[in-house]
Image (cartoon, coloured by chain):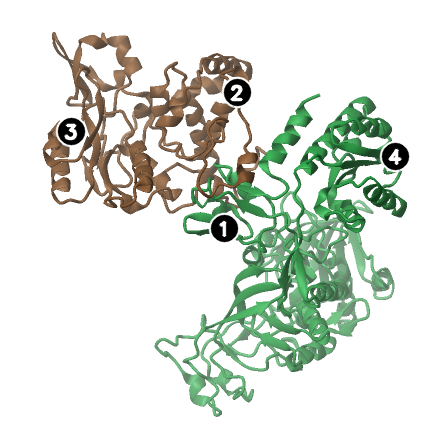
Amino acid sequence: MVKPDDIKKECKSILEEGKVKYIVGYKRNNNSYMSIPAFIEKIEETDQLIWDPTCVYNLVRFIRDEKLRKERHKNPDTRPIGVIVKGCDSRAINVLLQEKFIKREDVYIIGVACEKSGVIEKKKLRKKFNEKNIKQIEFGKDNNFIIATEKGKTTISAEEILAERCIECNNNTPVIYDVLLGEKVERSLSEHFRSLEKFESISTEEKWNFWKKELDKCIRCYACRSVCPMCYCDECVADSISLAVKPDTTAEEKAQKIRWVEKSPVSSENFSYHLIRALHLAGRCIDCGECERVCPVDIPLRYLNKKMEKEASEQFGYTAGLDPEKPALVSDFKDDDPQDFII
Amino acid sequence: MRKRIGFFICHCGINIAGTVDVSKVSEELSKYPGVIHSEDYIYMCSDPGQSRMIEAIKEKKLDKVVIACCSPTLHETTFRNAAKVAGINSFQCEIANVREQCSWVHKDMKKATTKAIKISKAAIERARLNESLEPISVPVTRRALVIGGGISGIQSALDLANSGYEVILVERSPSIGGHMIQLSETFPTLDCSQCIMTPKMVEVSKHPKIKLLTYSEIQEVAGYIGNFKVKILKKPTYVNPDKCTLCDECTKVCPVAVPNEFELGLTRRRAIYIPFPQAIPATYTLDINNCPGLFPIACGKCADVCEPGAIDFDMKPEILEEEVGSIIVSTGYDLYGKEEMAEYGYGKYEDVLDGLQFERLLSASGPTMGKILRPSDHKEPKEVVFIQCVGSRDPELHCAYCSKICCMYTAKHAMLYKHHVYDGQPYVFYIDIRSGGKDYEEFVQRAIEEDGVIYLRGKVSKIFQEGDKIKVWGVDTLSGKDIEIDADMVVLAMAMRPSEGASELAKKLKIALDKDGFLAEAHPKLRPVESLTSGMFLAGAAQAPKDIPEAVAQASGAAVKAVNILSQDRLYHSPTIATVNLTLCTGCGMCVDVCAYEAIKLEEGKAVVNEVLCEGCGTCSATCLRAAIKVKNVTPLQVHEMIKVALGG
């Protein structure tokens, strides 16, 4: 497993050489066992960097923020930014490259292989431990996690608190990077789409009831959208409030603004919002699980996206973010594509 | 500004009025906001119907009209032209399809009427937001390209050239002539195929307006109707046709012998060869795939003996770039493959032939100089079995379609066999005889009655060799008897299929294929020679199995279609094209990937639509995640308003 010191050393040398403007990584949150994103500009700050099972965040989101910052700046610093990415996160970069949202030279990618492990899922952790007691979680040997509490250290099998997406993951090594830490290890802890099984076996009515119950909870805070590395549009088609007005926006364009989805958080509009989002992520979602993590009302959004991922994989043999040079899922077809879904 | 909208609903006899209460629709729509004129009429597309619309527009100063009638593919142009006559922009006329999408598919009058009202209201909402547009005009390159030098391609090229237009005729093999030049005699008149074909070939080669490119292939096609840019790969023949004197010395020294394609493998040819004596262009070709080698020269004997020095080993492939206004595709057919017909022993037994091989045996210029001899032992066959529908009309295993010409050529084969071998006995196994065509039925009857061909209605179950005979087991379903024939030769009427490489070419041309792989016509009845790509036309067996007269007729039809384009000063293109909202476009390029017409490019990180290439299909609009690209007069706002009114009330 990659040691935090390896990351510190690598980042130090990158900053020393002046290759990047700053590095986005993970550091300890002072009053919690969790990590938080860290923006490392100075060499001495690299000591703050950590690498442990709480590094759950997909830092690719910050590439978008940097792009916007650069666009606003008159004389921007055009050096790339460094980003620490896991296997899943690296595929998000590939999707952004594929969609020409960023250029390869905009980012310096520090890939970290998850090897045989992954990151925790807070929900699972809470069931087993009192969060308040936890001081720190570390990678242990043999695919174990070491949980340090006030009373001492406990070793627990990683699978017990590993995020579901990590258990299903088969892209545990970054697919694009400038420097790779850790080793490429083939592993799959379970079937790739295991978590979908329970949804696929239930009836349409049960599915409807399940999603009605879940989506009715939505308060339309748009946190899922804000955290998603793929949601970079200036104007969201699923949002009737925001209108991107730029110098070249014409009066006609303003007049033609349509409310496909009303802003009130009622069933029909919540369904529309989430289904539009799921469709817009088809062939783009790389299953970093951020939408589900940030949801304040615990909607299992990952299942919607995972189902789309499964369809793309089974019907068209497509996995998001593997090759930025290939056309996107929805902009490509083959003569032998399945057509049985056409009524 | 408040729009003044006129609404008209057509009875279409009882096609619409039989299921939809048209007067109720008209009454209901007269109350709809903005509608100041509403009426129903028995045939809106008739002259009086159109006049009513024109008068209403003039009298009531209407600025938009909606016609509830049949599909816009049928009468949209009619009504738009009428609107133009009345003095409003033709795009201010919108069609509500209440026939194909309502009256024809429903039975309940009440519900159908409600639906017709909704469809009409939705069309009014769409019309309300329609922009006035003018057609986009583009210049025309007054030259044509014909792909394929068989009888169809030759006919098209000659018709075009005789109309005064320059033609480029591209043929991938070393000579033009196609399959027709391989045939012996043609049904039903039994005139010699070569004798009627060669004058046309010569005419092509001498015509000042025709540029003939043989041994050449289409590499790339870009552009659009009136303005295609074509890249043609001219493969090297390694023989300079101007110097070659056709002395035939080179073939005498060539050490290689490979199956002769022109004789369908019945004889062998050299690596340097002329396909047949009347080949156009009359020159030799060095087949590099079978030559011992040029890089470095492994043999070089042909060049050594060539007195005029016509053989040039340094010849290089050339890529020619041509601009044309129209393209005719006549890539022809191949016979169904040997590998698929193993059950009839084809490819296994030497004396089981296909139709084209038998043509060569019959041909006066063929390998046997017109004598019918078995390939195995060169003896005259005394009993010959002809089997029809080999691969055709067999949806389970082979082709579902009828290859159309086999009934006729099998009758011809049997008849000609009898003319050659007086004491021979031809048998024909058939499913049924399809002899529709001028003098065709009489021809088949002549074969049966005068020439004594025995027709057996039934299929053959097994063919196998026994001694020097080929045993044919079959059944005669009319008498119910099992049939066993000790044949000397079996001729299979193999199914026709699109020529090899036709699908790749279709991809380059962006022409659709039908389910069997033949080139798809734009409309099976009314546009049989047009492809779905404007400016490209189809001729001959590339579109479907057909005989010579049909192929020639279609070729002439395609030529006239091409002249339709080439004779114009400018072409007009529909202005309902995609436009990009630059504010929202992020330059992801998905629209570029999906555009079937290659009409979109990225420029400075934003999508830009080529307005001439764009066909307004809307695929880009459906793909764009950011709703940044839309088609004029089918904007998301229009669709939204249409959905709203369709769902409400």
Q: Where is residue B476 in the image (x, y as percent from the top left)?
A: 78, 49
Which colour is chain B painted? green
Q: Mark 3 lies on which chain?
A: A
**What is the distance, in whole Å, between disc 2 and disc 4 at their CAs?**
43 Å
Residue type of the residue flagged with mark 4 = Ile
Residue in front for this viewpoint, B646 or A172: B646
Residue of label 3: A49
The answer to whether residue B352 is visible is: no
Q: Are marks 3 and 1 in contact (CB under 8 Å)?
A: no
Q: Do callouts 1 and 2 point to residues on the same chain?
A: no
**What is the distance, in whole Å, between disc 3 and disc 1 at their CAs?**
45 Å
Q: Residue furthest front?
A: B1
Mark toward the viewer: 3 or 4: 3
Q: Are marks 4 and 1 in contact (CB under 8 Å)?
A: no
The answer to whether residue B647 is visible is: yes
Q: Does residue B383 appear left or right of residue A211 in this picture?
A: right
Q: Does residue B57 appear left or right of residue A232 in this picture?
A: right
**What is the distance, in whole Å, between disc 3 and disc 2 at their CAs?**
42 Å
Residue of label 2: A269
**What is the distance, in whole Å, between disc 3 and disc 4 at their CAs?**
80 Å
Residue type of the residue flagged with mark 1 = Val
Residue B63 sits in quarter = top right
